Amino acid sequence: MLNYNLKLALISFKRAPSLYFLVILTLSIGVGLLCANLALVSSMASDPIPEKSEKLFHISMNTWPNDQPNEEPFHILRYRDAMKITESDIPKHSAVFYESGVYARDAESTNLKRFDSKVRATTPGFFALTNAPIAYGSAFSKSSGMEVVIGHELNNKIFAGENSVGKVLELDGELLMIVGVLKPWHLRPLFYHATEGRAFNLTDDIFVPLETAIDLGWSIHARSSSTVSYKGVKFTRDRNVFYLQAWAELENQNKVTAFQQYLDNYSQSLKDAGEHPLDIRNELSNVNDWLLENDIVDQKVLAFTLASVLFLCVCIFNASSLLLSRFHAAKFEVGLRRAIGASNRDMLLQGMTESILLGLFAGIASLLLAWLFLKLSSEFLPDLANLAVLEPKLLLVGILLSLFTAISSALYPLYRANRYTISAELK
Amino acid sequence: MNLKALIKSLMLRKFTTGLLILQLAITLGLLVNSAILALDTREKLSLSVGIDLDNILIVSTHPTSGNYRDLDYFRSIATEDLAKLSQLPGVNSVSISNHLPVSHRGMMSNVFDLDNPEQERTDKYLKDVNYILAEENLASSMGFTLIEGRFLNKSDQLDFGSDTKRNMVITESLKNTLYGDSSALGQETNNGFIVGVIKDVILDPSNPRDKQYGVFVNTIMEYIFVGRYYILNVEPGHMASVRSKAADTILAVQAERDIFDVFTMADRLKDYYRDDQGLADLFILLCGLMILVTAISSYAYSQFHIARQKKYIGIRRALGARKIDILLYVLTENWLVYTLGCILGIAVALGFNILLSQHISLSKPDLGLFLVAVSIVFISGTLATWFPANKTSKVPPVIATKTV
C-alpha cells in the first residue's frame, strides 16, 4: 500500500512539476530562514558547560573605595580582593584572571612573523574549573613562572599542530616555555568572559600565570576601573584598580553558603577598618544566571527570528493555496478513484503520503538554505560569525518543521478534496 | 459593478480568501517595519559628527616586537612615523592618539570643577568623560573648531613622570555643564587646568548630543604604548593615494608592526552602525522573499478561481460582456481582497512594531510609509492577477461554456 501511495505521489509530482517546485521552494525558504535563526538563538542561549554549570559561580563584590561606584556590586575586582578568594579552601577550584594580548612567535624559528594572540592571565585553578581539554603536557600549577599553556589554533599556526610542549615562545620580547597544549575548545557562550560583549569570542590563544603577566606588565585588554592613576598593570597589586574577574567551583549548597559567609566576613573586616563605604553586597551567580544577567542573547537576532516566524506562516499559507489549486485540478482523478472503490481513508492516506514526501524534500532543501542563510547573516552581522553553526539537533528541527509545515498546508486542501461528490466529478 | 455580488462570490471561498488576506496583512506589516528600520539606519548614518569625515584617514597599528617595551625606542619610531606620514603628498597634518571620535567607551575619567565637587552627583555623564591622550597636532588633523582659548601646544607636554597638574582642552558640552555661559579658561578641575574649549564632536553616538563630554591632554608621548591611531588630515582629492601608501610608509620606518586597518572617519561611522545596517539589510532581504511568496500566492489564487469561474465568465461573455469588463471584474475582485488585506495590515504593522520595539529600538510607523507599502502590494498583486485574468478574458464563450 505504501509503495502504491508513493508511486501515486510521484506520478502526481511529475504531472505538475512546476507547482510542486513552488510549494517546496516556499516551504524550504520559510523553514530554512527560521532554522538559521533558531541555530543562532540556540547557540546564544545554550549552556556552555552543562556538566557543572550549576556549580560554577561568578563573584561580584562591592568593595569600591568611595561612595561613587560604577556599578553595585562590581563584576571586576581589585587584586587584594581577588587574592582573598584564591586563599580560601572552600571552593574546589577557583580562578582569578584578566584578559591581555601579546604577539607570539617560536623563539627558535628564523621566521620573524608574530601572531596576534589573545591572552588569559590566570591563576592555575582556571583549567580544572573550566574543564579546559588538554591535548599535550599539562596545565601550569603555580601563579608565577615563565610557563604558558597554548590553545589549539595558535599551536596550529606556529607549530603546525605538533606536540609543542617544551618549546619556547617569544612573547613581546620575553621567553616563556610551553607546558601544555589544549585540544580544540569551543565554548559558546564564552561564559568565563561574558561581559563587554565578548560572550561569543573564541577561547584564548595563550594562558599565562597571573603573577607573571602582572610582573611583565602585559596590559589589561578588558574593562578596568580605578580611583587612582597608575602606570600599567605592574603597579596594580596594592592600588584600587579593579580589573580581575573571579570564579569559584562550589560543589553543594553548604559550600555556597560557607563561601558567601567567607566573602561577607572579609567585607565586614574591610568595613570595620573603614575601607568599605558601600553596603556589603557579595554576589555569587552560577553560569546560567550570570549569562542571563549579562543579556548575551543578541536582541537583533531575536527580532529577526520573530520576523522569520511570521514569514514561515506566510509560506504555509502560500503552499496551502498552491496545493488547493493542485487538488482542484486533480478532481477528476480523485472522483474516478473514489468511484472504483477507494474509501475516504484511502484518499486521506494517499494525500498524507504525498505531503510527507513533500515535507522531506522541503526538509532537505531547507537545510541547504539554512546553511546559506547562516552564512548570509554572519555576512550582515559579523559579530555572529563564531555562532553560525548548524548543530545536529537543528538539522532534526529543520526536517521536523518541514514535515509539520508540509502536512499543515495540505490539511485544508485534503479536506476539500475528500468532500467532492463522486457524481459531480465524473459528470 | 455589483459590489454585493462580489462579496458574495468571495464568501463562497472564504478559506482561501482569508488566507490571502492574512498573508497580505503580514507582508504589509513586515514591509512597513523593514522600511522603518532601513530609514532609521540611514538617519543614524547621516549623523553630523562635527568633523570632515571623508578627508580624515586613520591608521590603526600596534608593534609586534618586544623592543617596543623600551618606551624611548617606541617614541623615536612614532616620531619618525609622524614625520614620514606628513611628507606624503596631499597630507595636511598628522597626529597620534589613543582614541577616536564615534566610539563607545574607551579611556574614561570623572571630571568636576575643584570648587564644585558635587557636580558629579547631579550629572552621571560627568563620571565617564572620554579622556583622550593627544598631542599638539590633533586639532589640525581632526579639524576641531576652537571656541575659546587655544588647543594643546608643545609646552603642555610635561616631563615624563611629572605629577604637576596638566593643562587640558575640553569639549563645548562639558564646558556648558561645568561653567554655563561663563568662560572656562583658567578654571581648575580634578584633571587639571582648562586652557581651551573646542566645538563638540560626536565622541560617543550612544550618548545624548549635549553630553559629548571629552577632555584632551598632551600626554600621548608619555604613554606612547596606547598610541594606537595615526590621524591624517588629507587634502581633498588625495585620499586614494595617501590611503594606498600609509601602511607601507609606517612599515618602512620599522617593519615589526601589525597594521590592523586603514580607514577614513566616514568608514568609522559606517562601522559603528554596522550591526544596524546588517539588521536592516536582513529585513530588506526578508521583504524581497516575502513579496516573491505573496506574488506566487496571488497568482495561484487568481489562477485557481479564474479556472473555476471559466464557465461563468463564458456565460457573461456570451451575454455580451466585453473583455475589458471581465478583466475589470477579476481585478476588482482582487483589489477588494487587497483592500481588506491592507486594512488588516495596519493592525499587523502596528502590532509587529510594538513587538519588535521590545528587542530593538525603532521609530513608530507613519502614514506616508504605509501608503508606499500599500502601493507596492497593490502593484505587485495587480501584476500577478493580470496574466491569468487576461488569459481568461480571451477565452471564446463557446469554449468556456462547453460543459454546460
Image (spheres, coloured by chain):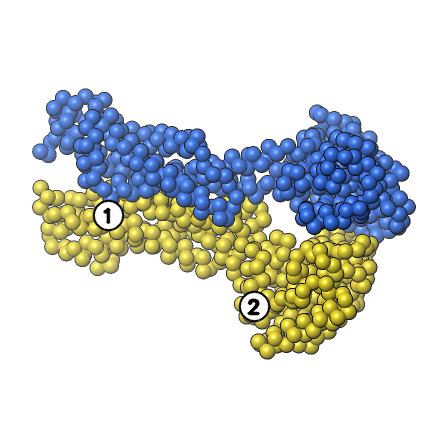
Q: Which residue lies at the image location 81% right of the left edge and 55% below the top edge?
A: A230
According to the picture, the residue beneath numbered tag 2 turns out to be: A53
Which color has been applied to chain A in this rendered view?
A: yellow
Q: Nearer the viewer, mark 1 or mark 2?
A: 2
According to the picture, the residue beneath numbered tag 1 turns out to be: A413
Q: Give the mark nearest the N terminus, 1 or 2.
A: 2
Image height of A402 relative to A246, above or below: above
Along the viewing direction, whichever of B37 and B176 lies nearer the viewer: B176
From the top left corner, tell me how far across and down residue A165 is, in percent. 72, 66
Relative placement, left or right, of B273 versus A9 is right
Q: Quadrant of residue B2?
A: top left
Q: Is residue A209 visible?
A: no
Q: Which residue lies at the image location 58% right of the left edge and 57% below the top edge?
A: A294
* Chain holding disc 1: A
Say what amino acid the circle numbered 1 marks.
Answer: Pro
Image height of A408 relative to B266, above or below: below
Q: Mark 1: few, some, or many residues within 10 Å (few <14, many ≥20)? A: many
Q: Quadrant of residue B392?
A: top left
Along the viewing direction, whichever of A280 and B37 lies nearer the viewer: A280
